[in-house]
Image (tube, helix red, strand yellow):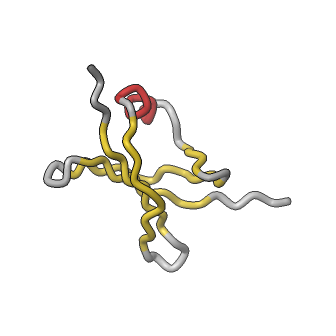
Amino acid sequence: MDQGLNVVLIEKLPGGEMKEIETRRWSMNMVSSLEHVNYLVVSDQEYETIEGRLNVDQERLELLLVKMKHDS
């Protein structure tokens, strides 16, 4: 049975600070889809994925994101 993986979404702010957006359990299918996507939508906000880090000590995947700005 697919146990999934805890994924932590971290936004890199314009000044370089890091802000944790959320932690959520993802299925392995969702984790595998990261091979094919560059952008995520969370709470109706689009983010570009910059890097990922597998934190073995805390048993989680950490994704560094940058908020996308869209002209209205």
Vertically, is 40 above or below 70?
Answer: above
The one nearer the camera, 32 or 35, is 32
Q: Toward which corner of the image does residue 30 lie, by quadrant?
A: top left
Residue reaching furthest left? Answer: 57
Q: Toward which corner of the image does residue 28 lie, by quadrant?
A: top left
**Horizontal arrangement in the rendering, residue 55 relative to residue 11 (left or right):** left
Vertically, is 37 above or below 2?
Answer: below
The one nearer the camera, 50 or 60, is 60
Residue reaching furthest right? Answer: 72
Q: Which residue does the image show at 60% across and 46% down from the upper left? A: 41
**Horizontal arrangement in the rendering, residue 28 relative to residue 17 (left or right):** left
Residue 12, horizontal then vertical, whole percent: 47, 67
**Horizontal arrangement in the rendering, residue 5 relative to residue 58 (left or right):** right
Quarter the N terminus occupies? top left
Q: Toward which corner of the image does residue 58 lie, by quadrant?
A: bottom left
Q: Which residue does the image show at 31% across and 47% down from the upper left? A: 61
Residue reaching furthest top? Answer: 1
The mark total stands at 0
Q: Which residue does the image show at 45% across and 70% down from the upper left? A: 19
**Horizontal arrangement in the rendering, residue 42 relative to residue 17 (left or right):** right
Vertically, is 22 above or below 3?
Answer: below
Residue 42, horizontal then vertical, whole percent: 58, 50
Quarter the C terminus occupies? bottom right
The one nearer the camera, 68 or 57, is 57
Residue 46, horizontal then vertical, whole percent: 63, 51
